[in-house]
Amino acid sequence: MESNSKVYQTYVKILQRELVPAMGCTEPIAIAYCAAMARSVLGAIPDRVEIIASGNIIKNVKSVIVPNTNGRKGIAAAAAIGILGGDENAQLEVIAHVPEEAKAQLGEYLENTPVSVAPAASEYVLDVTVTVYRGDSSASVRAVNEHTNLVHIEKDHTVLKDKEILAIIDEDAPDYNLLTVKDICDFADSCDLEQVAPVLKRQIRYNSAIAEEGMSGKYGAAIGQTLIRIYGDDVKVRAKARAAAASDARMNGCELPVVITSGSGNQGLTASLPVIEYAKEYSLPEEKLLRALVVSNLITLHAKQGIGRLSAYCGAVSAGAGAGAGIAYLLGGDTTTVSHTIVNALAITSGIVCDGAKSSCAAKIATSVDAGILGFEMYRNGHQFYGGDGLVVKGVENSIYNFSQLGRVGMKQTDREIIRMMTKCN
């Protein structure tokens, strides 16, 4: 692929835009970010907080431990730590460096500060408004469609920012519609690694560190450790276990950052760690690993793009297919092999639901990585799913479209029912 082509330049920009660090699950981080920004606009620590959030935000914050909160879960904890110790200029790392004094104040602040939460009457699946009060003064901050996309800021009913809510959030954003499996493989073969290596090496470094922590520490349901203990340390098991262990840690309050993909830390872990483990197993050179990570990340983004950031469709499914594609490429697979790996993987696990961020995400990641690996092993052993097998149709792009429609359109009512059930439960 020519380096001056539109597709080439777009792919470089997508990787640089998507592979960014985040500390903590991105939905509570969105609340913490809005809360920190609202506190900054107010100019004081608020004595009352109101949060209005879309169902998908409420779903994904309900059960996950928020870092730097001494093991607390939920919306109130995320907002409070953002208020007390958040850096409003750090975006997805807003609570990465919370001062010890802020942590110490958190319990008393939550006990003495009313924090109300209400569902948003909104058409947007990602929609958060945090309004804070101090006496007669107030400030309000709203994010829509992306975790840090602030569309409205006001203080004492004076509008400081009012940005039109657009389907295209950033007019300078790359065109994700240019992603195709064929071009992704071509780009991975030909790209100048100096243009993408910094974000990929950071992904290797950050995500490997939290995987190590998850494998050695006590986090959640310990899915990663259980896999190794029960099934041994074959590379196929290690690939699943390390991705799961990283999620074990991340979903249960680990204060290490991860490099995300498609707005999700769990997807970033799923797309990268299995590929890294396979490269270690076969002692492959760094260049080959970096090119395989180009494939796994871009395939994940391609498979998820038609679904949207938040859905009833578990994002680990797309990332597991991405990991399988990256492994296929890493071990010498061509575009045809990568394509069949993707289709096989999606045919196996599509339909896993997202019922919020929590400990069981690690198990869903392990299952999705297993599907990615199986999808690859099927094809290189002469087996595949064919058009007409369920949602599989002839052509990888057509199959990706079908599974995307399932996630975006077909599972809308499923999403509403999941949210209803979760918000009904204590």
Image (cartoon, helix red, strand yellow):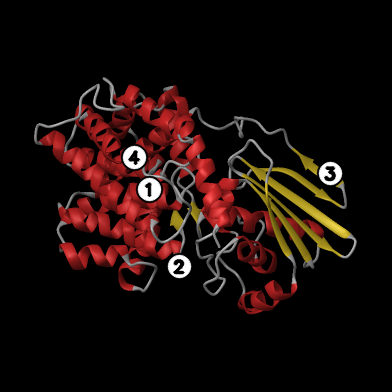
Q: Please say if 89 is above or below 351.
A: below
The answer for how far apart the CA atoms under marks 1 and 4 are is 8 Å
Q: Earlier in the sequence, mark 1 or mark 2?
A: 1
Q: Secondary structure at mark 2?
A: loop
Q: Please say if 278 is above or below 48.
A: above
Q: Is residue 158 visible?
A: yes
Q: Earlier in the sequence, mark 3 or mark 1?
A: 3
The answer for how far apart the CA atoms under marks 4 and 2 are is 27 Å
- Tell me the amino acid under the disc marked 2: Cys
Can you give x and y, in whole percent of width and height, for residue 295 in the image? 31, 38
Query: Disc 3 designates what residue?
Result: 159
Query: Disc 2 designates what residue?
Result: 254
Can you give x and y, in whole percent of width and height, for residue 388 in the image? 25, 22
Q: Secondary structure at mark 1?
A: helix
Q: Kindly check if marks 4 and 3 are in contact, taking CB atoms under 8 A apart as contact.
A: no
Residue in the image at 75% along x and 67% along y: 114
Q: Kindly check if marks 1 and 4 are in contact, taking CB atoms under 8 A apart as contact.
A: yes
Residue in the image at 65% along x and 78% along y: 101
Q: Earlier in the sequence, mark 2 or mark 3?
A: 3
Q: Residue furthest top?
A: 394
- Tell me the amino acid under the disc marked 4: Val
The answer for how far apart the CA atoms under marks 2 and 3 are is 37 Å
The mark closer to the camera, 3 or 1, is 3
- Say the numbered circle drawn on residue 294: 4
Q: Earlier in the sequence, mark 4 or mark 3?
A: 3
Query: Disc 1 designates what residue?
Result: 200
